[in-house]
Amino acid sequence: MRDATRVFDSLLAVTTLLSRDLEREFARTGLTLPRVHLLWEVHRAGPTTQRALAEALAVSPRNITGLVDALEASGHARRAPHPTDRRASLVELTEAGRSAMAAMEREHREVATRIVEGMPERDVAALADALDGVVARLTRLVEGDGDD
Amino acid sequence: MRDATRVFDSLLAVTTLLSRDLEREFARTGLTLPRVHLLWEVHRAGPTTQRALAEALAVSPRNITGLVDALEASGHARRAPHPTDRRASLVELTEAGRSAMAAMEREHREVATRIVEGMPERDVAALADALDGVVARLTRLVEGDGDD
DNA sequence: TATTGTTATACTCTATAACTATA
DNA sequence: TATAGTTATAGAGTATAACAATA
């Protein structure tokens, strides 16, 4: 099982490198990883309550308050009144938030291209398939023994 | 370049899942990710000055002071006098620190095995090779445009 | 009575700057 | 004069608990 270890070690290395790369990228725009994560979720799902965001990011509601405060201050997001529930508000992107997400999508495509640069197309497809499987197993693993 | 995107997205997912898995594992032992990272470096390199640890973890010297303080308090590491330089100290593992690292190595082997469970051996080897390449490209990418 | 989000409080990781003790 | 590590200070992310307004 030598190769299983190699796979695992590489994935750990990727985790470190990718976090570092993302943080550096965000630093340029004054954003941080958790803030981008939140922005990304709103970008993906549309206007969302903070409650839902807390669940989506697997983080406490209190935490979301802080992140949204920061994103309002930096002009990337805003709180809008919930149409039917006056307790809640809907977090939505501002124009600046939308363009930050668009820039990030471009950047991601660029990085995606470069990390497989020079690989034969067939190998890239095989790698993608193999990683799908790894993600599935890892998800089961993480969710599986989470209930202790 | 659809598959490049799939690869990248999977790697992002792995990053999230792996961080979460590691954190949960550490929580059991009262450790945190940065503390384990430091412990791991000492385990790997032997007794080390805080200066060297700051460079190895790419973090400020002040930060190392805090991490080592915490690890001394939890009994995983200790500061020993440097044999020739009285300004410096050498951080080394205690017995508890060593056994935590041993437990972690076992746990890692277990996870490594499970994330490729059911894959033909040849595919695991191919995946390991492909990931080596990805790590190499990603390293160049991160270090390459770090000099702005 | 339950839920949404907030204030209050606290801990961890992180950084820079100023300072002490040694090289 | 330079280096190793510390104290001082600050900011980000995180959590739990208590509380407000609303369902």
Image (spheres, coloured by chain):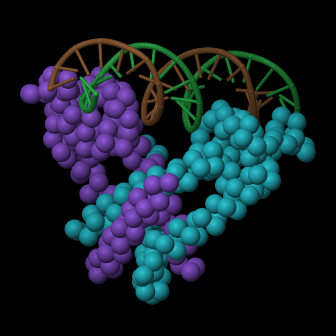
Chain colours: A cyan, B purple, C brown, D green
Give percent across and percent down for residue B19. Answer: 44, 50
Quadrant assignment for the C terminus of chain A: top left
Outermost left residue: B83
Quadrant assignment for the N terminus of chain A: bottom left
Give percent across and percent down for residue B70. Answer: 33, 26
Compared across the picture, whether A10 is left or right of D9 comes to left
Give percent across and percent down for residue C10. Answer: 51, 18
Q: Foreground: A35 or A95? A: A95
Residue A109 visible, this orientation: yes
Compared across the picture, whether A124 is left or right of A4 comes to right
Q: Residue at x 80, y 53 (%)?
A: A95
Displayed quadrant of residue B18: bottom left
Q: Residue at x 68, y 51 (%)?
A: A39
Q: Residue at x 35, y 72 (%)?
A: B133
Q: Residue at x 91, y 45 (%)?
A: A83
Give percent across and percent down for residue A6. Answer: 28, 66
**Looking at the image, residue A50 lies above or below residue B131:** above
**Looking at the image, residue B138 lies above or below residue A146:** below
Q: Foreground: B12 or B23? A: B12
Compared across the picture, whether B89 is left or right of B110 comes to left
Residue B124 visible, this orientation: no
Q: Foreground: C18 or A110? A: C18
Count how many numbered circles sit on residues in the image.
0
Displayed quadrant of residue C13: top left
